[in-house]
Image (cartoon, helix red, strand yellow):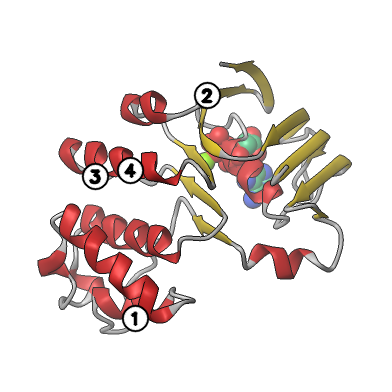
């Protein structure tokens, strides 16, 4: 199992109420959508999977490694994470292409994949532009292209399509379909994601209320 959570509770410091409770999940390969209202615990769940947050009770394993172990740093490198709030105010004039290249581990292979993805997503003309001058949706596209081009074993994305137009969402969901031999976990309310997903996990008030 690439991701295994056993009866996990997570609370933020200073808060008595756990942000997620009693969560047991096993994911090996395929595409999974996490859905639920604001505050349901979706972001907390992704960060717990990555070991950025540690369980107060229960155990979480990523690629076979307990997230409380020091080896979590090694296995986290085999994962891509697109956080909900990646868009920091631009401080540099990096081009979109620079931003993509910075995230690539296998440079040449990744670069070719990034170019193909940019073509499919009609983002080729964005690549030479300063990243900071792109619109929110265009930045989101670049960050997703980078995450997909990394082509790692585990891909976690937190509401990655929130600023994208309908056509880009559909194209991306089609592309996600090619990642079924990996593990892809997407927090999203988009129907297109639910359609391509092998499973949908619904959260409410920190708990899993439905898996379908
Ligand atoms: N940094 C934080 N400090 C304290 N409480 C937090 C923090 N982040 C989230 N929470 C709380 O944890 C719960 C789950 O939040 P979150 O995982 O962000 O939900 P979602 O991503 O589903 O909107 C909420 O009640 C939220 O207020
Ligand atoms: Mg969230």
Could you tell me how far apart the alpha carbons at marks 2 and 4 are, in whole angstroms? 17 Å
Picture coordinates of residue 173 (x, y %)? 32, 38
Q: Are marks 4 and 3 in contact (CB under 8 Å)?
A: yes
- Asked whether, in this view, residue 207 is left or right of residue 29, the answer is right
Question: Between disc 2 and disc 4, whose residue precedes?
Answer: 4
The residue under label 2 is 200
Quadrant housing residue 87:
bottom left
- Asked whether, in this view, residue 79 is left or right of residue 180, the answer is right
Could you tell me how far apart the alpha carbons at marks 3 and 2 are, in whole angstroms? 21 Å
Q: Where 4 sits versus 47, above or below?
A: above
Badge 1 element: loop
**Ligand 1 is located in which of the four quadrants?**
top right
Q: Nearer the viewer, residue 44 or 70?
A: 70
The answer to whether mark 1 is within 8 Å of ligand 1 is no
Q: Where 20 sits versus 86, above or below?
A: above
Marking on residue 161? 4
Question: Between disc 3 and disc 2, whose residue precedes?
Answer: 3
**Residue in view at x 75 percent, y 46 percent:** 12
Mark 2, Cα crowd under 10 Å, few <14 / some 14-19 / many 20+, is many
Badge 3 element: loop
The answer to whether mark 3 is within 8 Å of ligand 2 is no
The residue under label 1 is 91
* Mark 1 or 3, closer to the camera: 3
Question: Between disc 1 and disc 3, whose residue precedes?
Answer: 1
Question: Between disc 4 and disc 1, whose residue precedes?
Answer: 1
Which residue in the rendered view is the most extreme toward the bottom?
Answer: 93
Could you tell me how far apart the alpha carbons at marks 4 and 1 are, in whole angstroms? 24 Å
């Amino acid at each position: 199992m690439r991701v295994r959570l056993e009866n996990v509770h997570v609370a933020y410091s200073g808060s008595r109420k756990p942000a997620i409770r009693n969560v047991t999940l096993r994911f090996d390969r395929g595409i999974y959508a996490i859905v639920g209202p604001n505050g349901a615990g979706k972001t907390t769940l992704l960060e717990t999977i990555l070991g950025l947050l540690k369980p107060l009770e229960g155990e979480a394993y990523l690629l076979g490694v307990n997230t409380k172990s020091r080896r979590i740093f090694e296995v986290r490198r085999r994962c891509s994470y697109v956080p909900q709030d990646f868009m920091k105010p631009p401080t540099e004039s990096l081009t979109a292409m620079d931003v993509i290249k910075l995230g690539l581990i296998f440079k040449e292979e990744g670069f070719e994949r990034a170019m193909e993805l940019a073509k499919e997503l009609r983002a080729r003309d964005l690549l030479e532009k300063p990243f900071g001058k792109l619109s929110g949706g265009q930045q989101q596209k670049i960050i997703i292209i980078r995450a997909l081009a990394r082509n790692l074993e585990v891909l976690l994305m937190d509401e990655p399509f929130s600023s994208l137009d309908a056509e880009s969402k559909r194209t991306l969901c089609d592309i996600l379909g090619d990642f079924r031999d990996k593990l892809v976990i997407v927090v999203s309310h988009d129907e297109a994601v639910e359609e391509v997903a092998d499973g949908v996990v619904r959260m409410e008030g920190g708990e899993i209320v439905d898996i379908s």
